[in-house]
Amino acid sequence: MSEKYYQMKIKTDNPVNDLIVGFLSNVGAEGFIEEDDGLSCYFESGRWNPAYEREVSGFLTRLKEQREIGEFSVNVDEVVNQDWNKQWEDSVMPVEVTPEIVIKPSWKEYAGTARVVIEIDPKMSFGTGHHETTRMMVQMLSRYIKGNERVLDVGTGTGVLAIAAVKLGARACIAIDRDDWSIDNARENITTNNAAEKIQIVRGEMSSVTETGFDLVSANLNRNTLIYIGRDLYERCRSGGILLVTGILTLDEKDVVDSFGKIGFRLVNTLHEGEWSALAFSK
């Protein structure tokens, strides 16, 4: 375990911690601790990039322009490793995403009656079901997976959506991510959930998947990335197939809907939770 970490301390005059955590989940933050005066985010030294500070400041500037916040500050310091993982693990509990589906961390027991139990060891990443985007995407999957679908999960992260898809009845799923750490974590979680026979993991960009004709494509990313790869997503879907996307702030929803509409997608469903949106499109 790395002895040196970078601590990014973020203060805003209006609490938007969920938005910040959602944004930073895409760049490899390993831990988050909410404090009375703000949010501290931790990066292992080997995964730190100075550009992250500029990206967060740009993100907060955009929230300020949208009047979500007023003043903010971002400060970065080097810190010695502490047992943040233990603090975080103690706080993570099983989440019943729907009455039929629960996502639980590997270190906690679940004694409920949900039919589908997904066990995730997220290693301080997303995918535990505690973030709105994960919950909404699983809810969308439970609505659109009827059985025997071929699924593509773009930006799989912990692998939670790929696992949910096959546990809900999909016959096969390709899970793609460009981050080595995410690939390793997804592989562990897929094995734990006895889903390795149905899920193929691919390391790389969208171009690494040449197959088309997927019945359902899921992508929990962010506004800019989704718009950038929109045509690639369209090309991977079969005619009449479903695309599920999230990682979108509600204030950005119209931009994504308009962009995807120009490509040829038709919006068929939306979910909202907190400041986040999840969208379902048909090709």
Image (tube, rainbow, N blue to C red):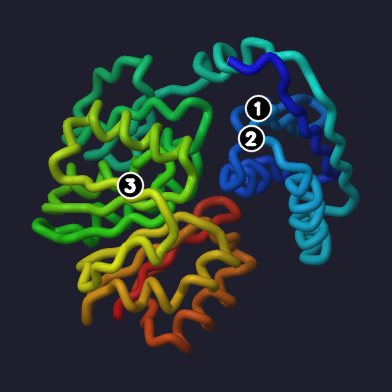
Q: Quadrant of the C terminus?
A: bottom left
- Circle 1 packing at 10 Å, graded few (<14), some (14-19), many (20+), is many
Callout 2 amino acid: Arg
- Residue beneath the point at 15% across and 45% down: 198
Q: Is residue 119 left or right of residue 80?
A: left
Quadrant of the image occupied by residue 129: top left
- Looking at the rendered image, the disc whose residue lies closer to the viewer, 3 or 1, is 1
Q: Nearer the viewer, mark 2 or mark 3?
A: 2
Q: Is there a contact, CB below 8 Å, between mark 1 and mark 2?
A: yes
Residue 5, relative to residue 204: is it above or below?
A: above
Task: Classify 10 Å Cα crowding around label 3: few (below 14), some (14-19), many (20 and above).
Answer: many
44 with respect to 107 (left or right): right
Which quadrant of the view contains residue 113? top left
- Is 103 placed left or right of 20 in the picture? left
Residue 207 badge: none
Circle on res. 47: 2
- Where disc 3 sits, the SS reads helix
269 and 153: which is toward the camera = 153
The x, y position of residue 21, in whole percent, is 63, 41
The label shown at residue 44 is: 1
In the depicted structure, whether residue 85 falls above or below residue 117:
above
Q: What residue is pinned by disc 3?
A: 161
In whole angstroms, how far apart are the C-alphas of marks 1 and 2?
A: 5 Å
Residue drawn at x 85%, y 44% as measured from the top left: 13
For the N terminus, give its image quadrant: top right
Structural distance between the alpha carbons of marks 3 and 1: 26 Å
**Amino acid found under the numbered disc labelled 3:** Leu
Residue 227 x/y as whole percent: 53, 73
Residue 279 spot, x, y in % from top left: 42, 66
Marks 2/3: CA distance? 24 Å
